[in-house]
Image: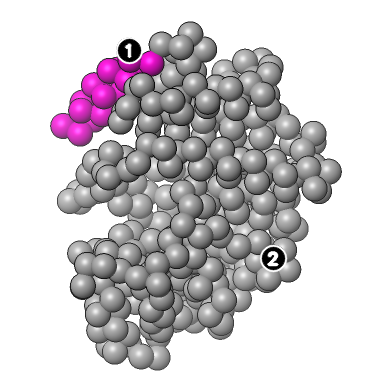
Amino acid sequence: MRFSVVIPVYNVASYLTGCVSSVLNSTETDYEIILVDDGSTDGRSGPLCDTLAARCPNRIRVIHQKNLGLGGARNTGLEAAQGEYLFFLDGDDTISPEALSILSQAVEKFHHPDVIAFFLELWPEGGSVPTGLQRHRLPPDQVCTLAQCPAMLLDTPSACARLWRRELFLKSGIRYPERLWYEDLYTTENLLLEANSIVGLHVPLYRYLLRTGSIMRGNDPSRNREILLALDQVFAWYRSRQCFTRFQEELCGMTLQHISYACYRVLLQDPHHPLIPQFLEYLTSHFPTYRTSKYYHALTRSQRVILFFLRHRQYRLPALLLEWKEKKNSK
């Protein structure tokens, strides 16, 4: 079997049918769908998984488990998968009808690479057209390694932005952490280091749903501390492979991006949170000369503004500016 499409399910009953239908409508036929009901509590998502599987028993398998978080659900799907490749699809997102066919052709063309990256379309909830495109930095239609294109460390770490050869997980022993935020950051950067062949397709295959207000919904700002744990794990992995110095510039750029994003989340919720100054302390302790990095100058204006105010320990003003920006963008 070519593909195992792993769909973690947690309280996404309103979106799940559309998600699964987007795979079933694929022009590719050599695939299975694994629905991992991760202890859903809405009383709807778990039964809906069973209903969908009953309609296509030769195509869909369901696994019900206690809640292990997104990472734990992906691990469960990974272990149960029969396909050569893993396609991780979140239960509220969809794929284009030709996505799996294009990926299958790429698998053959590039002799079964370890990783295939692609673009993601950003779809607003209720919208009829995408409003953005998330790109990667890989050259088009070429086989490379992380050493040949280290800037890919600054691409989104989302597991959903790449097709993964299952053997890469099995040989490396890398798995997703359970019940932790930023689970993709724990794994993607390490998998890219272990991969012998990586291909970038310059075509959007994944449709990411921008759920209204999701950045603010029910989040405990203290949990953003987990990004520091994820970064620690990545740095430890690269040091264990004697590769930290080799990729230090890109690891610095990656840290700048994720620290500014985590700070963005916390500032929107609580500009007086004690975690905010810890972000800058972490950044300067690992990369004391970060302001000379070429990736610092490549940050967005908002990211540089956040870091500027962090250095000057002024948190209320950027919080107000970010809140205004969020409200403006939501109109």
Quadrant where the image shows the N terminus: bottom right
Judged left or right of residue 196, residue 306 is left
Which residues, given as a range, are shown in magenta?
Answer: 315-331
Q: Of marks 2 and 1, which one's residue comes earlier in the chain?
A: 2
Identity of the residue drawn at 51% across and 56% down: 159
Helix, strand or loop under label 1? helix
Q: Of all residues shown, which one is farthest toward the right?
A: 242
Q: Nearer the viewer, residue 73 or 96?
A: 73
Quick one: label 2, few (<14), some, or many (20+) residues within 10 Å? few
Q: From what the image shows, is residue 31 above or below residue 299? A: below
Instruction: Write down the quadrant of residue 13 in the picture.
Output: bottom left
Q: Residue furthest front?
A: 274
| Residue identified by numbered label 2 | 173
Q: Which mark is residue 133?
A: none
Q: Are marks 2 and 1 in contact (CB under 8 Å)?
A: no
Q: Which residue is mark 1?
A: 317
Q: Residue at x 32, y 27 (%)?
A: 270
Q: Where residue 89 sits: x, y (%)?
A: 42, 63
* Residue 177 image point, x, y percent: 55, 58
Q: Residues within 10 Å of mark 1 (few under 14, many from 20)?
A: few
User: Is 253 rendered above or below residue 198?
Assistant: above
- Give SS at disc 2: loop
Residue for point 20% across, 28% down: 327
Q: Nearer the viewer, residue 126 or 182?
A: 182
**Three-letter code for the amino acid on which mark 1 is drawn:** Leu
Q: Say how many tags the image has.
A: 2
Disc 2 marks a residue whose amino acid type is Gly
Residue 327 included in the magenta stretch of the image? yes
Q: Is residue 278 above or below residue 251?
A: above
Decide if residue 96 is in sight here.
Answer: no
